[in-house]
Amino acid sequence: MLSELRITDFAIIDHLEVQFAAGFNVITGETGAGKSIIIDAVDLVLGGRADSDFIRAGSERAIVEAVFKLSADLQAALMPLLNAEHIELSGDELTLTRELRANGRNICRINGSTVSLQFHREIGQRLVDIHGQGEHLSLLRTPEHLYLLDRYASLEVSRAQLAELVGQLSALRAEIAHLQQDEAALARRIDMLNYQLEEIRAVAPRPEEEAALRAESERLANAEQIAALSAEASRLLDSDDDVPSALSLLNQIAALLHKLARLDPRMAEHAASAESAVAQVEDIARALSHYIENIEHNPNRLYEVEERLDALNRLKRKYGGSLEAVLAFAARCEAELQHITHSEARLAQLQAEEEALLHKIGERAAQISAARRQAAEKLSASVVRELAELRMDGARFEVSLRQEDDPNGCFVGERRLKFDATGIDTVEFLLAANRGEPLRPLAKVASGGETARIMLALKTVLSRADHTPTLIFDEIDQGIGGRVGSVVGQKLWKLSEGHQVLCVTHLAHIAGFADKHFRVSKRHNGERTIALIAELNDRARVDEIAEMLGAETLSARQSAHDILVLARNIKEGKSVQESLL
């Protein structure tokens, strides 16, 4: 429930704090005192329209803060949403804050954490339902009628199970549609896949060959220079020319060091090193000789290698940046070709599954529809009884359930019906406000007192199905006189047994049923006007209700006293006759 409301610099409100109670809360006051401004502030903090005109003149910002106490069930329902935004509850309290700034910016916070307006609004809609004369009449939104009826009939679980089946069907139909592309498009796709695969297979790339080919290309391209360098190195190492070779000189050095070592043993180690160097140079000379013999002067092989590298590069440019990517692309092509090749068999299988699922959906939807029709009859009868008590004896109310044929719909008996995740029904509330009038959609019925009573009747009947903890009625008494006012007051009070109810009213008979009564007034502070709100005690309530009756005479005060006594006795279970004694 809404336990506390704090408003700062909003319209004519300087600073206002009010603590509401469970049950039936009434707000009264003179026209223009600021009662509806308080409702506008609540609407704002729930995520409603923001306008910089709301900011009190001379102020930089307006702030509205609402504190809610959550039941255990509502906490459980909200926790997944709050956890997703990393918002923690403070015990059982949730605080919504909306800040408007003169520069047009507005900030939304939940328990101190900044959130998006969309998320702020989503949470707000679960906490409060505002019933005014305009867009907040949620019962006038036709799409809501099905959900209200389902909650009244306790069909939420069955509808969720149906929605799961419909989701399965959507996925299955998406695959069928993919397989049923036009034949020309499929033929073109097959040709393209075959062409791409043939191009890759013709080259038959191997990831490990590229580095070896590049090394071979480098050698073949430089074969003459390699041969010249190798021959010169071989000549210097070991040759029969008149100029002594490196190997010949090393042999001479090694022989001299061996002789020296015999004369001076300290040179033995160096002699051994020289002998080892001779052996190493001999190995180099043999290896170089063998290398020279195998140097390939083959322009044709160079051409082949370069052609192979060009072919690999073409594949990489077209099908990926590496040979591994090219091979992966080829694998995907093969898989898609395999899928298309077997598409006829797969399509037949999917179509059989689709038909079976359509029968299953039709069976489940028909069960839900039957339960809705039973609930609709009970709901209609209950609303008519409520309207009769609200002095609309000739009114008729019906819940319309329509179904539409669809050649691609689910199977229900001999028919195929249009369906969605909610089933096969289009639900709409219909009303004839006066005897002899035809039934019309609820959204098009007369405004004023009739609309107010219709809304109250529906809310009373649907209170068990409506999970919104706080209901706010802004001037629900429009067009209602004193005769009906007492009944409306009693209905609102009864409605507060399952909800917290806040009501802005001008009607004394409604105010008499309040569990907590607040008066809004305005006073002048210098040249500024400010709005105030105060909770009224029993004596102040008599004065306020007397003023609402339009007089401040003793008889008006007596009438006010009688209204309060009558309401108190009715709330205590006494009959109207007993209350009048």
Image (cartoon, rainbow, N blue to C red):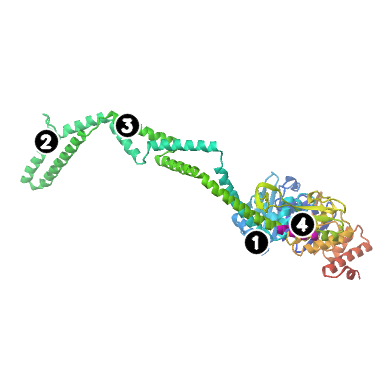
Q: Residues within 10 Å of mark 2 (few under 14, many from 20)?
A: some
Disc 2 to disc 3, C-alpha distance: 43 Å
- In the image, what residue occupies the spot 68% across and 56% down? 366
Q: Position of residue 528 (x, y in %)?
A: 80, 49
Q: Earlier in the sequence, mark 3 or mark 4?
A: 3
Q: Nearer the viewer, mark 2 or mark 1?
A: 1
Q: Amino acid at mark 4?
A: Ile
> What is the distance, in whole Å, between disc 2 and disc 1 at their CAs?
99 Å
> Is mark 1 in CB contact (under 8 Å) with mark 3?
no
Q: Which mark is residue 75?
A: 1
Name the image quarter holding the N terminus.
Answer: bottom right
Q: Earlier in the sequence, mark 1 or mark 3?
A: 1
**Which residue has dot 2 on it?**
248
**Mark 4 or mark 1: whose residue is earlier in sequence:** 1
Residue 224 vs 91, above or below: the answer is above
Residue corresponding to mark 3: 304
Give the image quarter of residue 561: bottom right
> Is residue 310 placed above or below 339 in the rendered structure?
above
| Type of amino acid under label 2 | Ser
Instruction: Name which quarter of the figure residue 25 lies in.
Output: bottom right
Q: Would residue 241 be seen by someone viewing this image from the given angle?
A: yes
Which amino acid, by three-letter code, is at mark 1? Gln
Q: Is residue 372 magenta?
A: yes
Amino acid beneath label 3: Glu
Distance from disc 1 to disc 3, alpha carbons, whole Å, reads 76 Å
Say whether residue 23 is magenta.
Answer: no
Residue 450, image x and y in percent?
A: 84, 53
